[in-house]
Each structure stands twice: as C-alpha cells, then as structure tokens.
Amino acid sequence: MEPSTKVAVRRVLSQTPKSTLVDPELTPAGVMVLMYAVDGRYRVLLNVRSDTVEEHKGEISFPGGRRDEGDETLLDTALRETHEEMGIRPEDVEVLGELDDQTTNSNYAISPFVGTIPSPYPFKVNEREVAKIIEVPVSALLDGYGIRDEVRMVDGQPVSSPLYSYEGHLIFGATAKVLSRFLELLDTATDEEAEWKRK
C-alpha cells in the first residue's frame, strides 16, 4: 500500500470515534480487516470457514477469533488468530485504525482492526479452519456490486442488514456489517486520495 493511501485510510478511520461494546455476557473477539493492492487494485481479505470449525461453518469471515487468556489486548487476539488461520506474521501487519465493535448471533463482541500487509503475500492457510481465501476488490464493493439488504425478524421486529454477493459467495451477518462500515468510511475520502476507488 502506498504511503499516501495509508495516510488517507488512517484519516478516514480517525474521523469518527469508535463505538465500543461493554457486555460481560458477550465473548470478546478480534478480527483483522486487511486491505492491500493486487496488480494495482485494492482488495479486502476474507476467508471461507471450514466445515470442521466449532462455529459458523462454511461462512465468510475476516481472519480472527475469540480472545485467549494470554492475549493482553484484542489487537493481540486479532493478530494471533490471523497468523494461526492465514499464516500472516504479526510483524508483517501495519495497523491503520479500528472500526466499531459488532455483535454476532453467536454472542460474540467483535473488535475489528484495519491494517495492510505486503503484497503479494505468501499465505499459509490452516486447512482445519479455512477452506478458501477470498480477495474482494474494494472498488466493486463501493460501486454496489452484489449488495442487497437482508431483512430478519429480531424480537418480533424486522431488522435490515447488508448482504454482499461475490463470485458465488454470500457475505452476511457481522462480517457484512463490519465490511459495510469500513466501506462507508472509505467512501468519505476524496477521489484524489482514494486509490482504492480505481478499477
């Protein structure tokens, strides 16, 4: 990622204070939202969870997971889990900011951290946890490619949330909400500084 692009991402992330969840009934977790260029086009890293993981089998997610006792911070959690799942070394991740905490229907409180990695990167996927890597172009997402609203009933009330479709994969739930917020903030950048808008 170009230095000017890092500056732009840091700026848009810092403009809005992060919304933090404090609920002892929720299990804390950390995820990494990694954006980097592939052949000059910016992408976001996601993965398809395997059928052998304990929860959310076959779903699309960001690298990350639940906090362990040895993790001093949720950033430590996100970096550790990203290394375990994708083989991305913590020292290769440059953290650019944070996004709002998000809940899941499995009672997790997710803290998302935004970062970048060198590209191309030699991923080493943990096949017990990850079935497939997905690199989604940011420009396509910002153009509204494959996005629609999903309406579910929660406590008797209809609740609308974003749902993305990319190459036959559906990105929904907390992952889609985190992704939607990230895109919303990226879209506030000027066209001059937003390298990620270029196709």
Image (cartoon, rainbow, N blue to C red):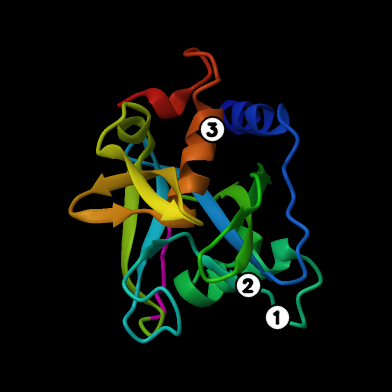
Main secondary-structure element of the magenta-colored stretch: loop
Tell me the number on the disc at residue 80. 2
Q: Nearer the viewer, residue 165 or 155?
A: 155
Q: Which residue is mark 1?
A: 68
Q: Residue furthest front?
A: 156
Task: Count every numbered label the image shows and give the total.
Answer: 3
Of label 3 and label 2, which has the lower sequence position?
A: 3
The label nearer to you, 3 versus 2, is 2
Horizontally, is 89 left or right of 95 in the view?
Answer: left
Which corner quadrant of the image does residue 16 belong to?
Answer: top right
In magenta segment, residue 123: yes
Give the amino acid at mark 2: Arg
Q: Is residue 107 above or below residue 35?
A: below
Residue depicted at 65% across the width and 52% down the height: 101
The label nearer to you, 1 versus 2, is 1
Q: Nearer the viewer, residue 72 or 192?
A: 72
Q: Is residue 14 above or below residue 59?
A: above
The answer to whether the residue labelled 1 contacts the one labelled 2, judged by CB atoms less than 8 Å apart, is yes
Of label 1 and label 3, which has the lower sequence position?
A: 3
Give the amino acid at mark 1: Asp
Horizontally, is 74 left or right of 148 in the view?
Answer: right
Q: Which residue is mark 3?
A: 2
The answer to whether the residue labelled 3 contacts the one labelled 2, judged by CB atoms less than 8 Å apart, is no
Q: Which residues are magenta?
A: 121-126
> Could you say where residue 172 lies in the image, as x and y percent from the top left?
37, 53
Label 3 element class: loop
